[in-house]
Every structure is written in C-alpha cells, then in structure tokens.
Image (tube, grey):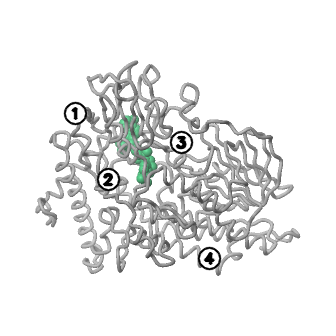
C-alpha cells in the first residue's frame, strides 16, 4: 500500500492504491451501460429543438446576393469573426444565424441559474474595446447574452445579419470560385470567403430511456427551458412548480447550476445522478468598480494569458485570477519545479496532488451534506482531469432541504420511464415533469438532423473529408476546402477552458488572412498538403495523449466516453499551452503565409 502524505488537514494519510482501485471500480460500473443511445429531436420531440424565445417570425423576402464574406453562426465564434472583419475594414459581410438574435449558447441556454463558471473579466471578450464592466465576478447567462447583443451593436453587425435563417446547403462552385449558401428562406448567398462558427454543443442529448415515449407528464431539456410550464425566469420564482414533483436528470455543469433554483420552488425534486460532479466553492461577488477602473490598458489580454498559463501548468509570477479553477487545476508548475525534472518523481507527485485535490472535494461534500449516505453518494471518485469540475455554493447545500431527494443510479442512469413515473431498480418515483440536463452531443458537426454538409470542389463532403484522418492547418484551414476558415473547431487547435480566448485569436487570424488575400489579389487559397502534414505532426507532439490515463477515467466527453474506435480523435487534440498556439498563429501570419498555402490569383495564374 502506498501511503501518501496529504498535507490538507484531516487527511494525513490516504490509501492511494485503494483509492485508485475504487476509481477503477467506479469507471467499470459505467462501462456496463450503453451511453450513446439518444432520441432524435424530430417527430414527437421536434419541439425540443424549436426556438422558444422568438415571439414573431421575421417576415422577409428571399435574397439572391453576392458578398465578400459570410460568417455562419452568431455566437461568440461568429461575433468575434465578424468583429475582427470589421476591424480590418471589411464591410461587405453577412452573418447567418438560426436563432432570433446573437448569443449562441447564451441565447439558447436560459435555464434558471445559468452562469459562466469562468470569471467574467477573463471570459467576456473585448471588454476594453467595448467599454463594459461586468457586474459580477461570475456573470449570469442573461448578462452574457446581453453582452453578445452589445457586441453586435458595437460593431454594427445587426444590419448585416440574417436571423431565424437556417442553412440548408453550402457548396463550392468552381465556375465562379464562390461558396453558394442556400437557406430555409430560399436565399442564395454567394460568398468568396466562408467563416464557420457553428460551435461544438448544439445538439441536445435526449437519452433513449426505455418507456420514455409512454411518459404522459411534461418533459423538456435545459437547453430550451420551458418557462411557460415552470413560470418565473432565469433568476427563479418558478411558481408553477410549487405543486409539482420534478425529476432532474443529469448532474454536470448545467444540472448543478439549475438544481438549487428548481429546489427552491418544486414541491418535490428528485435529482437523478449517474456520475457525481466534483463541486468546488464558487465565491461570486459584485465587481468592485474602483478596482475595475484602475486596471491598466491591455489588462484583459494579460489576464486571459495568465489564466491559460496557470491551467496549462506553467509558472506565472502572479495568479491574477485567484479563483477555484486555478486552485483545483493549477498548482502543477509547483510540482514540476519541486520534482527537479525527474519524470518518475514528477508523475508520483502529480498523482499525489490529484488525489489531494479530489480528497479535498470529497471532504467538502461531507462537510456540507448532512445525511452521510447522501454525502457519500455525491462524492466524485475519479481523477481531477477526467471531468470538468464545477463550482457552486448552493448545489450541495440544497440536498439538506426536505423536498430534495437524490436518486443515485450507481452509474446506470434511469432504468425506465412509465406513463407517470421514473424507475430506478425496483422503485418507481411518480413525477409530473422530467427535466433533462443531459448535455450535448459533443462536436456533432453541422450535418446532424436536418443540418447541412459543406461540399467542396469535386463534390467532396466535409464530413467525409474528416471522417478518416483529421487534417488541417492550425485547426482553421483544411486542404480541399478553399477560402474556408473554422473558428472554434476543437480539433488540431488549442482548447481553452476560457473558450472565447482562442476564438478571438482564430477570428483575428481569419480576418487578417481575408484582408491579406484581398490586398494581394489572391482569389482562392487553401492549405498546402505539406503544411497540413507538418501541422498534424506538430499537434500530435502536443496532444499529451496518454491512453492509459484516458482509459482509467470514468467515461465522459474528455475521453470520448472511454471509446477508442475513432482513429486519431485524441492525437488531434492540442492539450498543450493555448498561449503557445496563439504565438504560433501570430508568427505564422508574419512569416510563413504563402509558403504554406496553395493560391490562385485573380488573373487565374497559379503561384504554387
Ligand atoms: P454534461 O456535462 O454532458 O453533463 C450531462 C449530465 O447528464 C452528466 O451528469 C451525465 O452523467 C448525465 N446523463 C447523461 N445521460 C444520462 C442518462 N441517460 N441518465 C442519467 N444521467 C445522464 O452536460 P452539461 O452539464 O449540459 O454541460 C455541457 C457543456 O457545457 C459542458 O462542456 C459544460 O462544461 C458546459 N457548461 C459550461 C458552463 C459554464 O459555466 N461555463 C455551464 C453549463 C455547462 P455522466 O457524467 O455519467 O455522463
């Protein structure tokens, strides 16, 4: 038995080997279950994908037009892409968005309690430019959504946007070297450049639980909260739930934010848990206006850089954020330094630090939740990098309420649904409503259910193109799809917990290239095969792919639900320092550019 000296009070010695065995047992329970069975959001469930926020459908004629650049999506990816285009002087642009307004994930996800768990001063992009002070350290979804609208106004983007417009096809036409975009409004929009900002989480998962179709009560997904049913708003006062028995299924970042608000009003709330989240303290507070005013020019870029460096395990002079993310996921650089670079020692010290952090979270759970059996069931038994941590000061506390009941399914999820109840094991729990906080199909792509594929030269579909090996230059351009830039594609690009940080850089990158191509009379550009191959190798070097570590985790988005059947999916993830990725993009724009591209100039002469 390895005895680890855990410095935190109350856990002097921990049976590390025993704990690792426990982690594997918890993983194995979850591997018995088919976790990938979902219902299509069509037919009986089509309304779960409708837009509940639009009161009036925009009435407009179909358009037939040609523009310089189309941005697909009006979330942070699209907004930052369009803002960057404006900054380089591009006026002839269009934004196409399915929703009724800007906001993307913050437009759709308006469930009670929705907030961002990355601090607002780091998360909300372009604060200095827009001149906005977030009201709290952790902003509400409502504030973030309003900020998205503010970005739209600041960069004068509304006049160039088609809302409530769904793309039905995008095809490259060789005859005019333009992308032809068709929509459900019968539009045909031709564009030279295409910037894709469709986001990774836009297909809600409705688990295919036996009997679900028989359920006669109410049912919805947090992604389209039904306030007509619950009453109230994102802040709470869900008055219609006061005589209702509610089941909430799912205890990820969404479920945890939402549950305490529902608990305040539901007559009875069952929280259906498959895997507990690691729930750390939140510590939200209003913004100190004096402090905010005192921040020097360029502070936000520095803060974003600092946050990502800490989370990447790099040493920093000062932790500017001083939040729970850096407490829980940071601290790696101290271990690296203390180990003196000895790889064996470093690994064992990192393991010890991991156990220590998870043990702290488990102790915290026990201290807050009064019923010891409930507390035990709420403790996460897996490594800290297996799942996204969560931060909340009301979730665990809510289990002390008399109207809240945890149904721990020991990793299985619901066994059955009847016409008026949920079933776990032999027990039926009659309910009036089931709320699914069951997340999204990660990177489902644009083609999913009624979506569109992107068809490049020679009729090549993007979906097929990436079905084999994922290849790109910087995760932004890909050979075979000219003049196309991906903003926020998570393959072969850095991924940051602070998502808009990377989006902002990719957006700037794409806009700078659009400007350069236009200035240089380049008509068509795509990544060269050599440059792509070099980038694929560069990413593999930084993928930090450790299959043993991935396999030892409970299944989830981070380890592709613990499946390894899609070749290259892990190797294509950049898990290195996001700041390094940003430096690479910036250097490349200065130096490499044309050497890594195949371009055709206006006169039709091929340069490379
Ligand atoms: P999620 O992280 O995928 O969590 C889904 C939850 O539903 C998990 O607890 C999952 O259990 C459970 N689940 C799935 N199928 C189930 C079934 N059949 N029966 C019972 N339980 C089931 O989804 P999310 O919480 O909506 O988060 C989605 C993404 O948005 C994440 O990347 C998250 O970090 C992000 N997010 C961010 C914020 C923020 O503050 N920035 C807020 C909310 C969400 P298992 O763990 O066993 O799979």
What is the C-alpha distance between the residues marked 1 and 2?
37 Å
Tag in front: 2 or 4: 4
Q: Which mark is residue 402?
A: 1
Residue at 29%, 45% (x, y): give it: 395
Check disc 4 and report the residue beneath it.
588
Tag in front: 3 or 4: 3
Q: Secondary structure at mark 1?
A: loop
In front of the other: 509 or 125: 125
Is residue 136 in view from this perspective?
yes
What is the C-alpha distance between the residues marked 2 and 4?
37 Å
Residue at 52%, 66% (x, y): give it: 127
Label 2 neighbourhood size at 10 Å, few (<14), some (14-19), many (20+)? Answer: many
Q: Secondary structure at mark 4?
A: helix
What is the C-alpha distance between the residues marked 1 and 4?
59 Å
Q: Secondary structure at mark 2?
A: helix
In front of the other: 86 or 540: 86
- Judge whether 111 appears above or below 146 on screen: above
Check disc 3 and report the residue beneath it.
203
- Percent across and percent down for residue 148 are 57, 55
Marks 1/4 in contact by CB < 8 Å: the verdict is: no
Tag in front: 2 or 3: 3
Q: Which mark is residue 552?
A: 2
Tag in front: 1 or 4: 1
Tag in front: 1 or 3: 1
Q: Earlier in the sequence, mark 1 or mark 2?
A: 1
Tag in front: 1 or 2: 1
What is the C-alpha distance between the residues marked 1 and 3?
35 Å
Marks 3/4 in contact by CB < 8 Å: the verdict is: no
């Amino acid at each position: 038995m390895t005895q680890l000296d855990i410095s935190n009070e109350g856990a002097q010695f921990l049976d590390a080997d025993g704990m690792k065995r426990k982690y594997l047992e918890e993983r194995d329970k979850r591997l018995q279950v088919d976790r990938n069975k979902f219902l299509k959001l069509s037919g009986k469930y089509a309304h779960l994908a409708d837009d509940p926020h639009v009161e009036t459908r925009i009435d407009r004629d179909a358009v037939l037009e040609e523009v310089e650049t189309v941005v697909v999506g009006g979330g942070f990816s699209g907004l930052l892409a369009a803002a960057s285009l404006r900054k380089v002087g591009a006026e002839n642009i269009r934004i196409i968005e399915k929703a009724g307004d800007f906001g993307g994930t913050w437009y759709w996800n308006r469930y009670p309690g929705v907030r961002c768990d990355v601090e607002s001063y780091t998360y909300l992009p372009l604060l200095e430019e827009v001149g906005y002070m977030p009201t709290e350290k952790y902003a509400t979804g409502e504030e973030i959504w309003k900020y998205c609208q503010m970005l739209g106004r600041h960069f004068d983007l509304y006049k160039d946007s088609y809302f409530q417009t769904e793309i039905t096809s995008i095809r490259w036409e060789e005859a005019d070297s333009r992308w032809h975009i068709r929509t459900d409004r019968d539009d045909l929009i031709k564009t030279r450049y295409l910037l894709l900002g469709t986001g990774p989480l836009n297909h809600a998962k409705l688990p295919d639980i036996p009997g679900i179709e028989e359920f006669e009560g109410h049912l919805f997904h947090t992604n389209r909260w039904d306030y007509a049913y619950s009453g109230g708003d994102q802040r709470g006062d869900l008055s219609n739930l006061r005589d209702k028995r509610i089941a909430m299924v799912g205890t990820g970042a969404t479920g945890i934010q939402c549950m305490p608000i529902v608990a305040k009003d539901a007559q009875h709330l069952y929280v259906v848990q498959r895997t507990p989240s690691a729930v750390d303290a939140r510590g939200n507070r209003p913004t100190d206006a004096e402090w905010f005013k005192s921040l020097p020019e360029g502070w936000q870029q520095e803060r974003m850089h600092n946050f990502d460096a800490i989370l990447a395990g790099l040493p920093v002079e000062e932790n500017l954020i001083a939040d729970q993310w850096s407490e829980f996921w940071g601290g790696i650089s101290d271990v690296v330094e203390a180990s003196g670079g000895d790889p064996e020692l470093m690994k064992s010290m990192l393991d010890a630090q991991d156990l220590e952090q998870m043990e702290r979270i488990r102790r915290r759970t026990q201290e807050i939740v009064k019923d010891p059996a409930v507390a035990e069931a709420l403790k996460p038994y897996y490594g800290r990098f297996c799942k996204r941590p969560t931060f909340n000061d009301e979730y665990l506390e809510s289990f002390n309420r008399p109207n809240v009941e945890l149904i721990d399914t020991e990793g299985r999820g619901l066994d059955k649904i009847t016409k008026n109840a949920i079933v776990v094991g032999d027990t039926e729990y009659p309910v009036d409503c089931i709320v699914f906080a069951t997340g999204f199909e990660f990177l489902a792509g644009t083609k999913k259910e009624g979506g569109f594929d992107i068809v490049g030269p020679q009729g090549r579909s993007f979906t097929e193109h990436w079905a084999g090996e994922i290849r790109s230059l910087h995760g932004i351009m890909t050979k075979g799809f000219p003049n196309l830039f991906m903003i926020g594609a998570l393959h072969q690009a850095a991924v940051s917990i602070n998502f808009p940080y990377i989006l902002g850089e990719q957006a700037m990158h794409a806009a700078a290239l659009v400007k350069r191509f236009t200035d240089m009379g380049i008509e068509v550009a795509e990544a060269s095969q050599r440059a792509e191959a070099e980038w694929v190798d560069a990413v593999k070097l930084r993928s930090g792919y450790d299959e043993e570590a991935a396999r030892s985790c409970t299944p989830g988005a981070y380890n592709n639900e613990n499946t390894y059947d899609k070749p290259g999916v892990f190797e294509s993830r950049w898990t290195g320092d996001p700041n390094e990725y940003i430096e690479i993009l910036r250097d490349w724009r200065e130096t490499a550019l044309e050497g890594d591209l195949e371009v055709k100039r206006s006169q039709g002469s091929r340069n490379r």
